[in-house]
């Protein structure tokens, strides 16, 4: 057990925090919310230079071979700064899926481009029918068809809540090519040139003001070579990446939560009402402590999951627990902060809290909300073996309730005798 | 970062688990309050056996009866005990008071008491709470007055945990009439069979057994002072830190959940296992997530303790907070799943959860109070003020507030 970051990770954290403080102040976050693209190409190239875009790719594909835990450290800082960028879509959700399942040609072509900041890719996964009650991220939800036609596939259907599609060069589209016996069978991934005829992208208006889209694929023709991974075998490599993405969202929530905690305690210490700082009131203190507990819980669940992924260990249980807790906890953390800030936390132009709180909405649902991940936790519990049984010689005394046991220790024996005597006398009286 | 254990640590864990699996009877139920002679003598013997092998205190120095291993190994030992839910006679001695002795006992006291504690031979009580000193720990009225080489102790303690006849009572006493009142307290180790001590039962809703203790001119040698004169309050706070943290409680909660999940898988409702009900699954999944948070936070404290030299004192520890919060939540969620069956006492006709599983009815009762080592509210205030640096109402205003209330009444 060791809860400390390595020296290199501390350095990465410091570099990221310094860079984001300079390049991503509150004003930048607000600008990007109003911006049609929602990101800055200049800053995107700067983080490419810092190596953030190729952080976990192997060197042969233009990366630096960092660990997944490094990525989590980076995401904590990005979450803290609310850094608006298509990093998760491009580098993680699409890039890592291509790395996992793509052909050598695609990897050699796209990954170095991603690492250099030359291409943005967006994952077109979720659909209108399944986007409720935590169901969007289940393979059951994939109904957009891809039908073989000679050397091409024709993709037809609508994807919804597609992050960063409006700026993407490629869309990684998750399609159904066959109705298998299990929902995860028969899913195939295609890289679709975003400029293909028939692709229509419409920006949605969201709580966070982030850039999610409706993408309509109207009989879009895609060459066979654009298939990523095996025909009908797209879910397995994608599912692993969705888990990784979920953990990184948790890390963002940890970073954001930590900053919210700092803002809130600072405010409680400095805001004077009734001639006293409001933080002297125990109702206010309770909100701060609850906030702290949500963030700290999320922190260690997240880092445990990230560590498991880094080490290549089975992580289904840990990832689901982390996102279940963080999705629920982050919303509540923001709520506690709102209660302490009251009106000030409500006014959009005044401070950071509305920005965090509204972004929290995206983070909560993206890649699975609490309900979705609790279902995953329960699926793991299905596999729990029965608890280990003890093997010693039976004593035959364990199921006696304590008020029926004759105590051996004197003061308790006296009490027991007294009660028994009382009961006895009452019975006698009835006769 | 590293969320696993070394090979040696895993070996120790397996050794401990095998020991408990082989030693505990096959009809054993975890976390039952031991009252009868048979149960108590069984636990006493088992504790001695574990103590001889160094399983109670592997993290202590070898000269005091440990295995010279670290804080992590001590955490593993606690985890395996929690997993089995054994109610040890000596828990208080080696979990809270022993580590306290290591921190602020004299060399002579350490040599005298620690090896016996590590061998699992002694039962210690911590006698801190008084009728007028519950949450207000510093409001102690049990006086210890100097008399030659001794102190004479008079007063009453209440809600003192322990169901085994004790050997020693670590008693918080007032040794000086000071302002602020917490600067005049000290700790005395008092032999439980000293003349003038009376113990009376104080039955509660909890799993644990609690007592009232009366001191009537009890004579205690001065050398039995634990820690420094008039520094007792700070020592007690340190002991409470040990009491609030610890990997034992989350391990026990996880085990209880595991047993309860097994029960839900076996129990049939309308021809299907209870565990297939989506609402039951959601509740149990939440409990699993919370057990994991609790486990990690406790390990964080355990790890911090092992790195204390580098990291300094821990600014805040959430394990007590989570322990109190989740104990209630889990007891209630289990009871909700059981529905009206949840009110049936163990041994009753139709009582459902038997065998290894936790007693749902009793656990619910027990969770009605979470006052040990400070209520949940006190935990929150400690976290807010000590941990987050929020201001607290200065004690000097207390008298003014009381006077204002009095005035209004009149």
Image: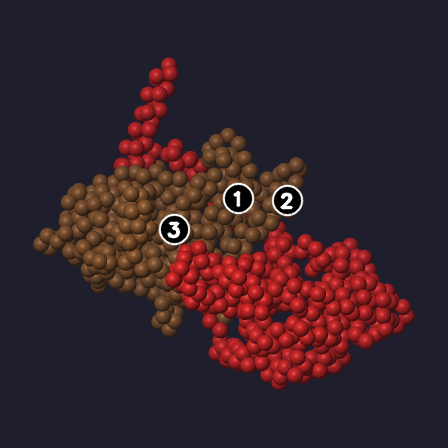
Chain colours: A red, B brown
Examine the image and state in which quarter residue A128 appears. Answer: bottom right
- In depth, the one of A128 and B260 nearer the eye is A128
Which mark is on residue B277? 2
Judging from the image, mark 3 belongs to the subunit labelled: B
Cα gap from disc 2 to disc 1, whole angstroms: 14 Å
Residue displayed at 64% across by 61% down: A365
Residue A309 visible in the picture: no
Q: Quadrant of residue A36?
A: bottom right
Q: Number of numbered discs present?
A: 3
The picture places residue B273, in percent across and down from the top left corner, at 63, 42
- Pinpoint the chain carrying mark 1: B
Closest to the observer, B387 or B238? B387
Q: Would residue A408 be found to the left or right of residue A377 on screen?
A: left
The Cα atoms of the two marked residues, 3 and 2, are separated by 35 Å
Query: Can you give x and y, in whole percent of width and height, for residue B107 in the image?
Result: 22, 63
B86 shown above or below A290: above
Of badges 3 and 2, the one in the foreground is 3
Tag 1 residue: B334
Marks 3,1: beta carbons within 8 A: no
Residue neighbourhood size for the residue with mark 1, other residues' Cα within 10 Å, grouped as few (<14), some (14–19), many (≥20): many
Quick check: do tags 3 and 2 share a chain? yes
Upstream in sequence: badge 3 or badge 1: 1
Neighbour class for label 3 at 10 Å: few (<14), some, many (≥20)?
some
Q: Are marks 3 and 1 on the same chain?
A: yes
SS category of the residue bearing label 3:
loop
């Amino acid at each position: 057990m060791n809860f400390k970051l390595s020296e290199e990770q501390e350095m990465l954290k410091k570099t990221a925090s310094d860079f984001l403080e300079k390049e991503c102040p509150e004003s930048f976050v607000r600008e990007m919310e109003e911006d049609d693209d929602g990101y800055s190409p200049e800053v995107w190239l700067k983080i490419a230079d810092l190596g953030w875009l190729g952080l976990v790719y192997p060197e042969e594909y233009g990366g630096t071979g960092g660990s997944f835990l490094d990525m989590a450290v980076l995401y904590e800082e990005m979450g803290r700064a609310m850094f608006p960028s298509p990093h998760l879509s491009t580098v993680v959700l699409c890039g890592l899926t291509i790395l996992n399942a793509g052909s050598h040609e695609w990897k050699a072509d796209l990954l170095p481009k991603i690492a250099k900041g030359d291409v943005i890719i967006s994952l077109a996964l979720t659909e209108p029918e399944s986007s409720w009650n935590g169901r969007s991220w289940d393979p059951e939800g994939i109904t957009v068809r891809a039908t073989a036609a000679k050397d091409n596939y024709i993709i037809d259907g609508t994807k919804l809540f597609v992050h960063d599609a409006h700026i993407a060069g490629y869309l990684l589209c998750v399609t159904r090519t066959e109705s298998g016996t299990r929902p995860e069978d028969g899913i195939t991934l295609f890289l679709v040139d975003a400029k293909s005829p028939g692709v229509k992208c419409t920006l949605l208006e969201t709580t966070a003001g982030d850039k999610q889209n409706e993408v309509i694929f109207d009989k879009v023709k895609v060459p066979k070579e654009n298939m990523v991974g095996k025909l009908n075998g797209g879910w397995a490599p994608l599912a692993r990446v969705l888990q990784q993405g979920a953990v990184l969202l948790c890390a963002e929530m940890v970073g954001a939560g930590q900053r919210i905690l700092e803002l809130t305690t600072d405010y409680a210490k400095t805001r004077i009402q009734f001639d006293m700082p409001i933080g002297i009131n125990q109702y206010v203190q309770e909100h701060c402590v609850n906030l702290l507990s949500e963030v700290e819980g999320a922190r260690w669940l997240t880092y445990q999951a990230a560590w498991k992924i880094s080490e290549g260990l089975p992580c289904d249980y840990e990832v689901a627990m982390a996102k279940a807790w963080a999705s629920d906890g982050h919303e509540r953390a923001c709520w506690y902060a709102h209660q302490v800030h009251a009106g000030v936390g409500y006014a959009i132009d005044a401070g950071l809290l509305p920005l965090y709180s509204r972004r929290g909405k995206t983070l909560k649902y993206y890649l699975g909300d609490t309900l979705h991940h609790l279902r995953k936790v329960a699926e793991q519990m299905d596999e729990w073996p029965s608890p280990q049984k003890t093997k010693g010689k039976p004593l035959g005394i364990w199921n006696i309730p304590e008020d029926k046991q004759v105590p051996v220790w004197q003061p308790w024996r006296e009490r027991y005798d007294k009660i028994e005597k009382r009961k006895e006398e009452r019975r006698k009286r009835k006769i | 970062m590293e969320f696993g254990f070394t090979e040696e640590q895993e070996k120790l864990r397996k050794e401990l688990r095998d020991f408990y699996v082989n030693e505990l009877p096959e009809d054993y139920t975890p976390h039952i309050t031991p009252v009868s002679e048979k149960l108590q003598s069984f636990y006493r013997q088992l504790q001695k056996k574990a103590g001889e092998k160094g399983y109670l205190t592997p993290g202590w120095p070898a000269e005091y009866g440990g295995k010279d291993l670290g804080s992590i190994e001590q955490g593993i030992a606690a985890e395996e005990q929690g997993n089995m839910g054994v109610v040890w006679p000596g828990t208080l001695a080696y979990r809270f008071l022993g580590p306290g002795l290591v921190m602020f006992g004299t060399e002579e006291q350490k040599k005298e008491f620690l090896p016996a504690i590590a061998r699992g031979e002694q039962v210690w009580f911590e006698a801190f709470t008084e009728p007028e000193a519950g949450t207000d720990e510093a409001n102690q009225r049990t006086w210890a007055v100097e008399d030659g080489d001794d102190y004479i102790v008079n007063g009453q303690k209440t809600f003192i945990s322990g169901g085994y006849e004790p050997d020693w009572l670590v008693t918080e006493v007032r040794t000086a009439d000071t302002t602020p009142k917490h600067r005049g307290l000290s700790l005395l180790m008092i032999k439980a069979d000293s003349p003038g001590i009376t113990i009376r039962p104080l039955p509660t809703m909890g799993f644990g057994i609690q007592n009232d203790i009366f001191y009537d001119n009890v004579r205690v040698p001065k050398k039995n002072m634990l820690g420094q004169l008039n520094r007792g309050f700070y020592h007690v706070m340190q002991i409470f830190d040990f009491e609030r943290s610890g990997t034992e409680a989350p391990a026990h909660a996880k085990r209880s959940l595991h047993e309860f999940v097994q029960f839900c898988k076996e129990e049939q409702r309308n021809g299907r296992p209870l565990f297939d009900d989506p609402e039951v699954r959601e509740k149990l999944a939440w409990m699993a997530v919370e057990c994991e948070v609790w486990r990690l936070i406790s390990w964080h404290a355990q790890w911090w303790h092992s790195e204390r030299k580098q990291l300094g004192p821990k600014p805040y520890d959430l394990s007590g907070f989570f322990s109190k919060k989740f104990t209630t939540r889990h007891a209630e969620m289990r009871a909700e799943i059981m529905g009206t069956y949840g009110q049936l006492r163990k041994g009753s006709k139709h009582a459902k959860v038997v065998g290894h599983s936790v007693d749902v009815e009793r656990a619910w009762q027990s969770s009605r109070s979470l006052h040990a080592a400070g209520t949940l509210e006190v935990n929150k205030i400690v976290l807010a003020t000590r941990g987050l640096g929020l201001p607290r109402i200065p004690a000097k205003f207390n008298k003014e507030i009381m006077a204002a209330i009095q005035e209004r009444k009149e």
